[in-house]
Amino acid sequence: MAQLIEKWKLRARQLKIEIYAIYLAYKDPRVPWYARIFAACVVGYAFSPIDLIADPIPILGYLDSGLVFVKSSIG
């Protein structure tokens, strides 16, 4: 159980670092406007309680949820 808690703590720290990196990129004036919009959409989709692509749709439904999970797992 302790290993699981440590694993979640590590993932939370990594997520905090990644969110801050996206924030810094969003605020940087050298970043193009379309990259800023994309960054905002990625963060919004990751934290949205609404699933835009329903899970019963074959393949695509689980793929969109899985990509967010895989990204958070690999860091």
Image (cartoon, rainbow, N blue to C red):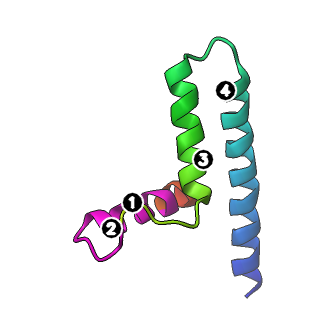
Residue topped by disc 2: 61
> Residue 17 or 27: which is nearer the viewer?
27
- Give the secondary structure at mark 4: helix
Q: Is residue 55 magenta?
A: yes
Q: For the point 39% across and 59% down, which residue is it?
A: 64
Q: For the point 75% across and 77% down, which residue is it?
A: 5
- Give the secondary structure at mark 2: helix
- Give the secondary structure at mark 1: helix
Question: Which labelled disc corresponds to residue 64?
Answer: 1
What x and y, as percent, mark residue 19?
70, 44
Mark 3 vs 4, N-terminal side: 4
> Over which residues does the magenta segment extend?
54-69
For discs 3 and 4, the disc positioned in front in the rendered view = 3
Q: Is residue 35 magenta?
A: no
Residue topped by disc 4: 25
The overriding secondary structure of the stretch rendered in magenta is helix
Residue topped by disc 3: 43
Above or below, 32 relative to 58: above
> Is label 2 in contact with label 1 (beta carbons under 8 Å)?
yes
Amino acid under disc 1: Asp
